[in-house]
Image (spheres, rainbow, N blue to C red):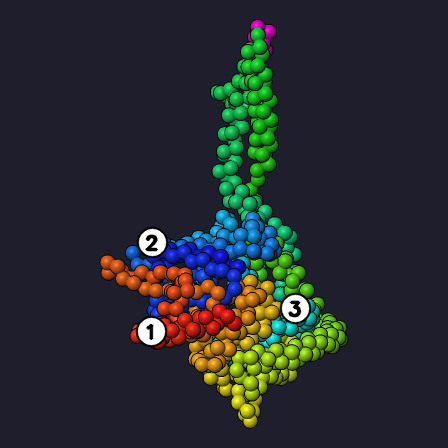
Amino acid sequence: MLSLLHIENIAVVERAEIAFHPGFNVLTGETGAGKSIVIDAISAILGRRAYRDMIRTGESRASVRAIFTQVPELDWFQENGVPYDPETVIQREIYLDGRNVCRVNGSLVTVSILHSLGIQLINIHGQHDAATLFDEENHLQYLDAYAENQALRQDYGEKYAALAALRKKIDSLTMDEGEKLRRMESLQYQIQEITRANLTAGEDEALEERRKILQNAEKLSSGMDAAVECLYGGEDTDGAAGLLSEAERELSRLARFGEPFATLHRQVADLKYQVQDAAEEARAARDDLSYSAEELENIESRLDVIHRLRRKYGSSCQEILDYCQKAQEQLDRIQFADDELLRLKTKLAQTEKEAMESASNLSQNRKEAGQRLSQAILEELRQLDMPRVQFACQFTQTPLGPNGMDSAAFYLSANAGEALKPLSRVASGGELARIMLAMKNVLARQDQVATLIFDEVDTGVSGRAAQKVAEKLRNLARDKQVLCVTHLPQLAALGDTHLLISKSERDGRTYTTVTPLDREGRIRELARIIGGASITSITLQSAAEMLDLFICQ
């Protein structure tokens, strides 16, 4: 349940703190006073989209903070690493640079994660819901929500996914004979071309390394000669190995005079052995150096072959070999496609049968739920002063698809003697408001969300119908917390809590305030709604009588 809403710097609201209560909360005020701003602030706290334009002119950020009480221990808290508290605090800050900072019980969350929590706390029903109610694409979704057929939908979804995968695999193997022959010839040519080259993994890298050595053989030979002479010495110089041997002999005689000399002797002895090993390796490497023009020519020729293959099949010998293997697998699949197709088609027939059975079960469940839904909505509509209304959920069988084998549409006849027609073609504004309220009321019984918000859903309703709508909302508020933005005195009079949203100007700036009304305040506000700008003693008396009458009901 939404207990407290704190708003700062959103549109014309500089700062407001609104306390909501259990039961039926009504919000009224002049057109343009800022009622929609309160709904926008609640939407922001639920993780819906928020715009920089919401920020009050001259401010760098806006913020909304909400306290929810009696929050159940939802899986959401554990799944998102947020500490659970039955008194949950949600805060959202919106900055001019586009940043949004969201926190739940002090933990940072993303807007999308906040939204996944928000839809479990509050449902907002506004005039825009009429569009979704009109759209027959959404009717099956409404019906499935009422039917609570998640297990059947999951079972069908798994079978349909398997069916779609089989169909896709069969399509990939199905080709005409001409295309099949062309594809086989292309693959055979590629496999033969790679196989003839007799490549080995890493061969190109080894050849390029050897070519580099052969191309620089003279420079390498000269350098190795110089290195060997430096290590072993020459006619006029002592090599490093000889000098280190002499140093080691001298230090060996000094080692007995103390540990520092012994340590130094060991270090030089290690160096002597290392240099001697390096000298041997250098001499062996020099002796192994050889230059063959024929070998270089063979390497160049071999690299040309590899280069041509690399341009077609991959950037290395390993990638070319991998390509050859995949080509062979494709060729095998095509050559044995008839056998595989036969196997897959046999499996497809069984999978289609299973999917059809699952879709039939789902369809039967929907049709039974459709009858119950129609009866429940009819009962609600009769209570909303539409006694002669007819309502039905009509089904059309379709080919198997992601949603099963059905399409569903809501049909209505609002007047006696009129045939059932699609909802979008027969409902007036006032009728649509009552139909939507009836549907929301029915669906809310399956909904675990504790707070429902109705944003001017009473548009187009007046007189006795308005009284029925008001009573229906108050009845709904016995099980749920209901917030309702309204212009109807009947709804305002039935509220358990009445909040007035008003607008004023100070120093050239507009300010919106939210004020909880006592009895006298409610009488004056009801009088304003009834009589407009001219509030007379008669309208005040009528407002008082209405309030007293409805409170006693």
The relative height of residue 224 versus residue 190 in the rendered view (above or below) is above
- Residue at 48% from the left image edge and 77% from the top image edge: 467
- The one nearer the camera, 326 or 347, is 347
Density class for disc 1 (Cα within 10 Å; few <14, some 14-19, many ≥20) is: few
- Residue at 59% from the left image edge and 16% from the top image edge: 266
Helix, strand or loop at label 3? It is helix
Residue type marked 3: Gln
The relative height of residue 546 versus residue 1 in the rendered view (above or below) is below
Give the residue at mark 1. 537
| Magenta span of residues | 252-257
Instruction: Name the mark nearer the viewer: 1 or 3.
Output: 1
In the displayed structure image, the side of residue 450 where residue 16 appears, left or right = left
Residue type marked 1: Ser
Q: Where does residue 255 sit, x and y in percent of width and height?
A: 58, 9
Q: From this viewpoint, is residue 370 visible?
A: no
- The one nearer the camera, 384 or 401, is 384
Helix, strand or loop at label 2? It is loop
Sequence-wise, the earlier of marks 1 and 3 is: 3
Q: Quadrant of residue 253?
A: top right
Give the residue at mark 2. 60
What secondary structure is the stretch in magenta mostly built from? helix
Give the residue at mark 3. 150
